[in-house]
């Protein structure tokens, strides 16, 4: 239905506009590193949305970003979420009048900067496991969900089938259905997470999830959007741009997510536990950098072998793709750009994988 689709697009552009607003707030307070990160994150999401819309307009044979009833489910989810989160804010305001305890204080280093304990670093990296679930939705859970939905719709009365456009869902092939399912899940995740992070930055005293601030690093405490937001933006962006590509779309998205997540997590945890040789006297170490490249490379090999089994592609192609992406991730990690690596890893690795697959 056109109405629900337009409301869904409005929510997407509202999300994008919120990111741009946070970018300008960073600029206003002269936090230039946060501004660069925020503005590039915002621009990436805007590009992904516009390119997806234009793709379906230019070529009517290409499906739109989302179809009914997935857009309807997004709306149904978001409005109760906004209401519930507003109630949490109201409760937090009342609590803060009685208790001014600051949960953001942590151990600091010699320079007065926050130092996250190892367990907090592990908590941060657990978010990567959630994102990796997208790989399973593309290749396992999506097909299973469609099977359950098809059987459920088949027993519904005709007037309910028509209301939910059940016939449209039934005729979708597994690839298209899974793409819509992944877009739906990443959309509501981004909108929900950004709502919380917006309150954290705009009105930190009203933020009802103050305990989560313990997981934020020093540079993420003020107007810089959280790493979970850049990860969500990076994920939905590659899903919108590369996901609809026939045959190779799910492969590009899943391989990029897996290698980026494994590389980032392993580099961080190895660097914290056994890292001795620091890179440019910073927090990162050469041990972590090498470990991240190695584990990212191995995860790429295992995924490609699993994906193409039993129709193996040549070992040279598997090695080339895995090694190239792992090295690119390592180079970006070494450069330590102002852009959050949760975004830069996903976008760059997706482009590299796409180009390599096109060259074969």
Image: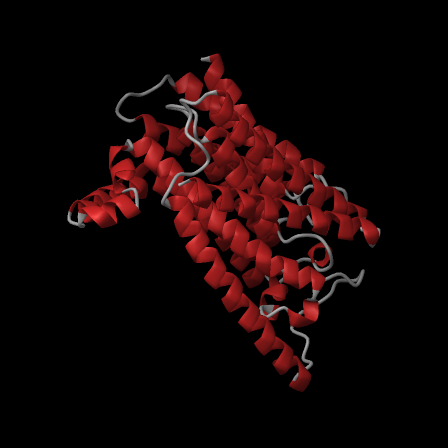
Q: As displayed, is residue 95 above or below residue 348?
A: below
Number of numbered tags placed on the structure image: 0
| In the foreground, 9 or 256 | 9
Image quadrant where residue 345 sits: top right
- Residue 23 in the image: state x and y as whole percent: 73, 47
Q: As displayed, is residue 136 above or below residue 113?
A: above
- Rendered-image quadrant of the C terminus: top left
Q: As displayed, is residue 15 above or below residue 324?
A: below
The residue sitting at 42% across, 45% down in the picture is 71
Q: Is residue 108 visible?
A: yes
The residue sitting at 63% across, 53% down in the picture is 226
| In the foreground, 121 or 128 | 128
- Residue 151 in the image: state x and y as whole percent: 18, 45
The residue sitting at 80% across, 48% down in the picture is 27
**Residue placed furthest toward the top:** 360
Q: Is residue 266 left or right of residue 202?
A: left
- Residue 313 in the image: state x and y as whole percent: 35, 19
- Rendered-image quadrant of the N terminus: top left
| In the foreground, 59 or 213 | 59
Q: Is residue 135 visible?
A: no
| In the foreground, 96 or 68 | 68
Q: As displayed, is residue 106 above or below residue 118?
A: below
């Amino acid at each position: 239905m056109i109405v629900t689709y337009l409301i869904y697009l409005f929510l997407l552009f509202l999300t994008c506009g919120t990111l741009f607003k946070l970018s300008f707030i960073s600029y206003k307070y002269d936090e230039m590193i946060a501004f660069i990160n925020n503005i590039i994150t915002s621009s990436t999401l805007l590009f992904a949305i516009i390119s997806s819309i234009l793709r379906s307009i230019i070529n009517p044979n290409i499906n739109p970003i989302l179809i009914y009833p997935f857009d309807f489910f997004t709306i149904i989810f978001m409005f109760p979420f906004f209401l519930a989160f507003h109630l949490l804010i109201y409760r937090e305001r009342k609590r803060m009048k009685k208790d001014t305890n600051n949960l953001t204080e942590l151990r600091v280093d010699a320079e007065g900067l926050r130092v996250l304990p190892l367990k907090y670093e592990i908590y941060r990296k657990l978010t990567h496991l959630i994102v990796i679930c997208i790989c399973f939705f593309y290749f396992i859970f999506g097909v299973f969900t469609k099977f359950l939905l098809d059987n459920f719709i088949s027993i519904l009365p005709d007037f309910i089938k028509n209301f939910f456009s059940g016939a449209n869902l039934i005729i979708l092939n597994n690839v298209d259905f899974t793409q819509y399912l992944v877009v739906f899940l990443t959309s509501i995740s981004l909108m929900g997470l950004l709502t919380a992070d917006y309150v954290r930055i705009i009105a930190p005293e009203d933020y009802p999830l103050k305990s989560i601030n313990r997981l934020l690093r020093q540079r993420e405490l003020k107007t810089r959007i959280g790493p979970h937001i850049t990860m969500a933006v990076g994920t939905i962006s590659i899903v919108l741009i590369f996901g609809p590509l026939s045959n190779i779309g799910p492969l590009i998205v899943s391989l990029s997510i897996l290698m980026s997540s494994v590389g980032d997590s392993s580099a961080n945890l190895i660097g914290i536990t056994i890292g001795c040789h620091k890179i440019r006297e910073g927090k990162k170490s050469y041990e972590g950098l090498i470990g991240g490249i190695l584990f990212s490379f191995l995860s790429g090999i295992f995924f490609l072998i699993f994906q193409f089994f039993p129709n193996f592609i040549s070992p040279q192609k598997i090695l080339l793709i895995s090694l190239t992406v792992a090295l690119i991730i390592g180079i970006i990690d070494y450069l330590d750009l102002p852009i959050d690596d949760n975004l830069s890893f996903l976008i760059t690795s997706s482009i590299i994988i796409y180009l390599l697959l096109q060259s074969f």
